[in-house]
Image: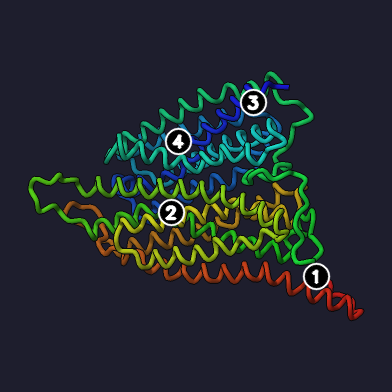
Amino acid sequence: MPSTITKSLVLLLCTFLGLVCGTLYLYSSYSPQLAQRLNYLATDSSLIALCGSLGVAVTGPVAGVVVDRKGYSVSLFIGGTSICLAYYGLKRQYSQALSSLWYLCFLLFSVGLGSTFINSACLKCCAVLFPNIRGVATSLPLALYGLSAMFYSVVASVYYPGDTSGFLGFLILSVGVITVICSPQLMLCDFRDLLPKRHRASNSEIIQLTTIGQKIDSEPIKYHGLHHNSELSGFELLRNPRFWLLFIATGAFASLGQMYIYTVGYMVKALVTNTFTTPVDPTAEYVPMEVVIQQEQQVQVGLLSVANCVGRLLAGILGDIISQSFRKPRGWLLFIPGIGLVATQIMGLSITDPHNLEWASMLQGFFYGFTFCIMPIIVGDVFGMENFSGNWGLVGMSPIVPSFFFTNHFGKVYDRHTVMSELGVTVCSLGNGCYRQVYKLTLGVSVLAILVVATFNFGERYLASRSLYQKRAGIKPEKQ
């Protein structure tokens, strides 16, 4: 058995590797500057961001297989190399003004790919080393995954104000150093057989990668007395209405969060451009508008990061409380992000001061993190753990299409309101009028998402009552 000190060291190193995994969410803090430097439209910038999300989504199953079959070493090498080379290419594109949209899309895809490979290795390593407290152990690297953007945003605002190229250089250096320092100890787990065989587990066995202290073999809560649809997968899963309700809800919640994360930089730019004034007092310190915009962008990204982390942790805690203490299904918790996202869409419609945008960023980050913590747990509760990885993989891909639509729609609306300035760059000075039309649409989507959540929860209660009535009346229940 490995010593407690050795296991604790590996856990600590996995936690720090979480910083590397979360750098993808930094994109919105420098995307407007990148677009301006390379003469891209907001629509193009949105496409680049979506390729990063696509890299995370589509490489998840592949990364799991690599970790299960080849160990941590290969996964860490692929992940670290992909991220470093991607940021090097990104810095080179920016510094030399080499405009190539599809190449940048590939670079962001590589960042997402590398993040997934490193994250998969860290999560499995923590879960296997601490089999009795897997939820707590895996929450640590996930926490720094969420806080990564906050860390880098603070560094950027303090040491690289207005210097996008210098900040990208720091990203390359820091990612490389963290990976080189933290990876060797994890790689030794492969070569020294540090992890006992009886505790080895495949990714498909690890359900509580986002929960806090929940036991693996805890019995799922049955939904309002209906027969629990345990161990569903494949075509049986696709024929189940609960799957599609979760699929739609996840797609709506996550895509609205991703749209905000990837476009908040443009929202800040529009609001600051609309409200920025030159100091009248000649003795007052003058800060160029571009510096103010970038600093405010980094503040928003930092707040999103912290709130995302808090949302993940709180969702795990509330999920355990509602299921174990009150014996109620975790699906009820979906009303929290549902109602919360309606509020954030209203805020997006009404906020005109860039400083007030901080509240929207905190709430949006919180509900986004809450969603991505509670959804996989619900998938395991409803459809069982045996095929969890495949089932959650299907549900987890639901945001791809709506996220592309909303983010691309935001870019098109924003571009329609931009004009060419005297300096030869495109700018929108209408404040929230640059993108307000988008939030009218997303507000309607968020309301519909609440109806889907209500159907998922109270529809189950209706079917259970109907089944009980038929049983008492001696009527053969209809085939579901």
Residue under numbered circle 1 = 480
Badge 3 marks a residue whose secondary structure is helix
Which residue corresponds to the image point at 31% horizontal and 56% vertical from the top-left?
355
Residue under numbered circle 2 = 362
Q: Label 2 crowding class (10 Å Cα cut-off): few <14, some 14-19, many 20+?
A: many
Identify which amino acid the numbered label 2 is placed on. Met
Q: CA distance from mark 2 to mark 1?
A: 42 Å
Badge 4 marks a residue whose secondary structure is helix
Which residue corresponds to the image point at 68% horizontal and 21% vertical from the top-left?
3
Residue under numbered circle 4 = 86
| Image side of residue 334 versus residue 217, left or right | left
Measured along the vertical axis of the image, is residue 279 above or below residue 9?
below
Measured along the vertical axis of the image, is residue 432 above or below residue 147?
below
Measured along the vertical axis of the image, is residue 21 above or below residue 306?
above
Q: CA distance from mark 3 to mark 4?
A: 32 Å
Residue 7's label in the rendered image is: 3
Disc nearest the viewer among 3 and 4: 3
Q: CA distance from mark 1 to mark 4?
A: 49 Å
State which quadrant residue 135 falls in.
top right
- Which comes sooner in the sequence, label 1 or label 3? 3
Q: Quadrant of the C terminus?
A: bottom right
Disc nearest the viewer among 2 and 4: 2
Badge 2 marks a residue whose secondary structure is helix
Identify which amino acid the numbered label 3 is placed on. Lys
Q: Label 3 crowding class (10 Å Cα cut-off): few <14, some 14-19, many 20+?
A: some
- Which comes sooner in the sequence, label 3 or label 2? 3
Extreme residue toward the front, this view: 325
Q: CA distance from mark 2 to mark 4?
A: 29 Å
Could you say which is closer to the camera, residue 154 or residue 247?
154
Q: CA distance from mark 3 to mark 2?
A: 34 Å
Is residue 95 something that shows in the picture? no
* Proximity of marks 3 and 2: CB atoms separated by less than 8 Å: no
